[in-house]
Image (cartoon, rainbow, N blue to C red):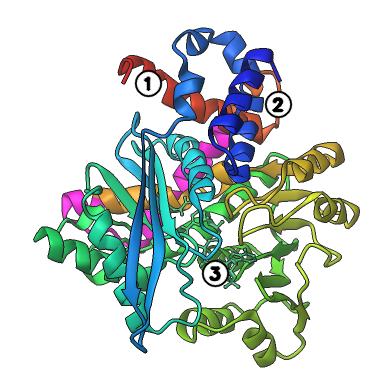
Amino acid sequence: MDDRIERIHSAVIARNPAEPEFHQAVGEVLESLEPVLAARPEYLDEAILERIVEPERQLIFRVPWEDDEGNIHVNRGFRVEFNSALGPYKGGLRFHPSVNLGIIKFLGFEQIFKNALTGQGIGGGKGGSDFDPHGKSDREVMRFCQSFMTELSRHIGPDTDVPAGDIGVGGREIGYLFGQYKRLRNRFDAGVLTGKALGWGGSLGRTEATGYGTVMFAKAMLATQGESLEGKTVLVSGSGNVAIYAVQRAQAEGARVVSISDSSGSVYDPDGIDFDLLKQVKEVQRGRVADYAAARPGAQLRTGEKVWTIEGADIALPCATQNEIDEDAAKELANNGVKLVAEGANMPSTPEAINVYREAGILYAPGKAANAGGVATSALEMQQNSARQQWSFDTTVGKLSEIMASIHDTCLAAADEFGHPGDYVLGANAAGFQKTADAMIQQGLV
Ligand code: NDP
Ligand code: 2IT
């Protein structure tokens, strides 16, 4: 790294102690920016780097709630409003016991560049809580969401900050959050949250958008090599919203997806994942991958095992969580002949894993490009809300497809411009950064 960039990274580490995921996300972006800063020295003169790594606003709040037995619990809520140069803060809410300020900051930081790449006029933010929805009743989840929104409602709005789902936050949670916001504000602000149900302001295609978008991006990458998904064998990790629709779309493109996983283990399904069964087990029964394996002849449950050791795959689509592919896992993928990694999750590959991809010549797309279809379709939901319209599924997915193709081409064009053809990491960071940095300069020192 260039000295000045190195100094800024060291300052981020010193000012934000005990936030390793945030340090990692900042390091990955800064490392890409050397050629950009050489070409555009005004970014250094205007202290864009120092400003962009500092959130505009960070909220931490108490979330007390009562369980079904009358016991009182206290969780911690977060919303980091990172950058509003391009539009209202936009980004999901994550409910998972591992959530802390550093994780929300890493996600919010990535969201700035991802949202810039979508071209949809949205700034970057992220929030969540260390609340664990696993094993909670619907009523417990509702009481938690109501308490969480009681504080969050002061800070958000359709033109201010627009949350959505992420790990542990899906349609059920968005419904409870919206209901409480509406009650507190006495306003039907449809555009204050995205990922709403279809009957009251949700967009067709939003549920599918992240997984579909990731597969569309992978397809565009393959097309640069004169290849397609037809006949390819694919590893998917995770079994939540992103994974389910990555499975469906990859199979619709003629691939065979042979794995899914959760935090207890993975499933190898050599005949190809049965999408209808997966959807039934996960979305209807709220079950585990073990329940899928039990109901699926020929599928093998691999308790405690990740999917990356499964042999015979051409493509890997990590769709679970951050740092799920470390150096050893990346070596397994390379040794087993995987040729392409496109990230449905946010930052699922460690920096060491990314180096392995580079050395092995694996085509690699970072999450901030490959999984941008979810937030892009959230912006399409906001458009529909503003216009009081509901578009057809095909209209929305058609727009999603155009957006993913545009992000893909933008990444490659920036990679070419800065002398690293085919480097999607550099391309995504350079393009997303420039768009945000230019807006920050135009808007003055705020
Ligand atoms: P879900 O909650 O629907 O699913 C998450 C999946 O990942 C579950 O299978 C879960 O297993 C697994 N998982 C979560 N944490 C861990 C962990 N620490 N170790 C192992 N497995 C884990 O979330 P999403 O599908 O929405 O999100 C998946 C990823 O995609 C995240 O990185 C998210 O940030 C990213 N993303 C999501 C978008 C969206 O629109 N939803 C948009 C862009 C990115 P278990 O049930 O056992 O915890
Ligand atoms: O990481 C992400 O982009 C999301 N969780 C989706 C955010 C959104 O506002 O739809």
Kind of element beneath mark 1:
helix
Instruction: Give the image quadrant in which the ligand numbered 1 is located.
Output: bottom right
Range covered by the magenta-colored residues: 384-412
The local secondary structure at tag 3 comes to loop
Image x and y of residue 170, in percent: 41, 68
- Label 1 is placed on what type of residue? Met
Q: Quadrant of the C terminus?
A: top left
Q: Which mark is residue 421?
A: 2
Q: Is 282 above or below relative to 156? A: below
Gap between marks 3 and 2, in whole Å? Answer: 33 Å
Looking at the rendered image, the disc whose residue lies closer to the viewer, 2 or 1, is: 1
Instruction: State the predominant SS element of the stretch in magenta.
Output: helix
Residue type at tag 3:
Gly
Q: Is 407 left or right of 34, judged from the image as shown?
A: left
First in sequence, mark 3 or 2: give its number: 3
Residue under circle 1?
440
- Whether residue 279 appears in this view of the structure is yes
Q: Residue furthest left?
A: 186
Q: What whole-number distance in Å separates the C-alpha atoms at marks 3 and 1?
A: 36 Å
Q: What percent of the width, then of the height, locates residue 417?
A: 62, 18
Classify the position of the N terminus by image quarter.
top right
Q: Nearer the viewer, mark 3 or mark 2?
A: 3
Q: Is mark 3 within 8 Å of ligand 1?
A: yes
**Is the shortest distance between ligand 2 and the CB of mark 1 under 8 Å?**
no
Q: Which dot marks residue 69?
A: none
